[in-house]
Image (cartoon, rainbow, N blue to C red):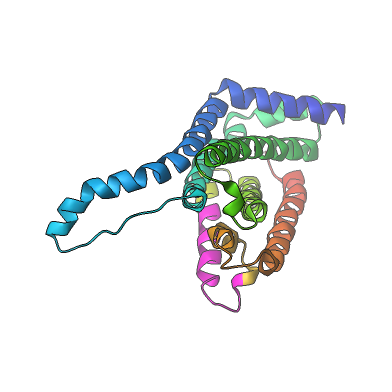
Amino acid sequence: MRSFIAFLKKEMIEIYRTGKLIILGAVFLLFGIMNPAIAKLTPFLMEMMSEELAGSGFMITEVTVDAITSWTQFFKNIPMALIAFVLLCGNIFTKEYASGTLLLILTKGISRQKILLAKIASLLCVWTLGYWLCFGITYAYNEYFWDNSIVNDLFTAVFDQWLFGIFVIALTVFFSVISESFGSVLTGTAGIVFALYIISLFPKLTCFMPTSLMNSSVILTGSELSEDRIMTVITASVLSILLTASSIPIMNKKQL
């Protein structure tokens, strides 16, 4: 356990020293501020455009914004933050393969399994810290400008989006273990997510697809109940566990 904690600490320090933690912190911070800012500025922007649009035959009625408007923006922006996260941290294994540093680490007596789990833990820590930082900033601004109490089941909606990020991390780690290039990792992860999204378009299969968790804004308005997401949450959780569990024996047998 001590070696696991030591390696996890080493990974977190490495993420910080390479500037990834600062960049991701800035990304999540920016999106956290942008969500309420865009909602707050929407009426003014629409008013500025009203004359131009009126000349084209479009009539703009009065635009009303509230906390739901800002939270909807939150769920639109988080996928972009997740993409930035994968682009910055998705090479956490492939760079080790290229440099050969994994062999040096193994000679120090740390097992492959502990290395794998420590790297996964570091990704989970960074994603969780960034995600909830973004959430906290948006929540605070929304509470100040409007009222968060008008939002239906906010925690469920926010949890679902966070869980989808965990699923993407599990995918990224799995493809990092079976492939040696960052491009293959990105292609594999994006390919699976896209395939699941296409499958989710079939109504009878929607509730089983982890990509359905991205559509969390429908919970805010009560269009969908949290109970309707139980199977989706279970599927995403089970797949994340299976992907991680499958990565361990593959990692143990991988030729380095």
Furthest residue toward right: 1
Residue 16, how many percent across, how many down?
60, 23
Q: Residue at x 54, y 25 (%)?
A: 22
Front residue of 117/56: it is: 56
Q: Is residue 78 left or right of residue 225?
A: left
Point out the image quarter for the C terminus.
Answer: top right
- Is 49 located above or below residue 32 in the figure? below
Q: Quadrant of the N terminus?
A: top right
Which residue is painted at 74% across and 35% down in the image? 118
State which quadrant residue 192 falls in: bottom right
Residue at image x 56%, y 38%? 134
Query: Residue 254: where, in percent of width, then height?
Result: 70, 45
* Residue 221 versus residue 48 in the image, above or below: below
The spot of residue 32 in percent (x, y) is 51, 38
Range of the magenta residues? 188-206
The image position of residue 234, as x and y in percent, is: 73, 63
What residue do we see at 40% from left, 53% from top? 64
